[in-house]
Amino acid sequence: MKFGVVVFPGSNCDEDMVYVLRNVMKQQVVKLWHKDHSLQGCDFIVLPGGFSYGDYLRSGAIARFSPIMKEVIEFAGKGGYVFGVCNGFQILCESGLLPGALLANTSHQFTCKNIFIKAEHSDSLITSSVDASRALKIPIAHGEGNYFTDDATLQSLKDNGQILFRYCDSNGNVVAESNPNGSLENIAGICNSTKNVFGMMPHPERAADNELSNTDGKVIFESILSLVKA
């Protein structure tokens, strides 16, 4: 399995993602610079977290026009797998690969802490190995993680099983108090209608190594590898 991790000016979680994919999951990984026009034959593309282009204008709004995004959009349109984490999720929404938008946190503050999420179902690539009854402790680090969309799109997300993760408490209860950013219906991650493009605000790559005393995020990478063969 060959993964490509796209690096934009301001990306700061690219090395974390490469480390987990290469050292923990033992996969082939290449870095793809934002000005490249080739995905180098990768089977799976990852847009990592960070502050692409300094988060000027809107988070992800400028990165959406990076040259490599043309290739990423074409790749996704042909059924290729694309996964965006935090800023990567914002870029996917800005590029139209995922519906909705990530607005400023309702606290109007940058939030960096461990939170809990639970999978809505196992009917997607990145949740296939996740126990939907279990709360996963995963870090967040964002100022614009408040997921929003219109009522019709929200209903479509529900009907099609496109909501992947919701914020919850440590016992798996999806309650308002467990929502760290005001996200609509506690939504922490979604996919597109064909379930080959995925986005989530929490950082599973920051919870996938024994050295960090937290491997709750590793199950997401295990899910990917359980269904996608090299």
Image (cartoon, rainbow, N blue to C red):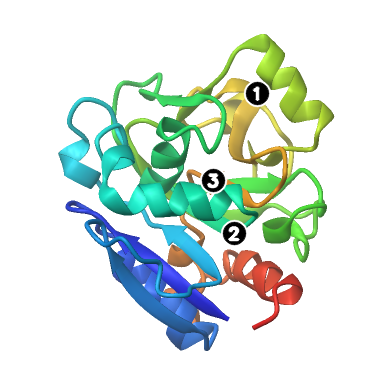
Residue 226: image quadrant is bottom right
Where does label 1 land, which residue?
185
Residue 19 x/y as whole percent: 39, 79
The residue lying toward the viewer, choosing from 158 and 170, is: 158
Distance, label 2 to label 3, CA atoms, is 11 Å
Element type at mark 1: helix
Residue 139 x/y as whole percent: 45, 53
Question: What amino acid type is highlighted by mark number 3?
Answer: Gly
Where does label 3 land, which residue?
199
Q: Earlier in the sequence, mark 2 or mark 3?
A: 2
**Which quadrant: the N terminus?**
bottom right
Spot the residue most to the top.
Answer: 151
**Which quadrant: the C terminus?**
bottom right
Distance, label 1 to label 2, CA atoms, is 26 Å
Tell me which residue sits at (24%, 54%) in the image. Answer: 8
Which label sits on residue 96? none
Mark 1 touching mark 2, by CB under 8 A?
A: no
Q: Specify whether 22 is left or right of 133.
A: left
Tell me which residue sits at (35%, 70%) in the image. Answer: 16
Question: What amino acid type is highlighted by mark number 1?
Answer: Glu
Labels 1, 2: front one:
2
Residue 152: image quadrant is top right
Which label sits on residue 81? 2
Question: What amino acid type is highlighted by mark number 2?
Answer: Tyr
Labels 1, 3: front one:
3
Residue 219 x/y as whole percent: 66, 68
**In the figure, 189 relative to 102: above or below?**
below
Element type at mark 2: strand
Q: Dot 2: within a 10 Å radius of its alpha carbon, few (fewer than 14), some, or many (20 or more) residues?
A: many
Element type at mark 3: strand
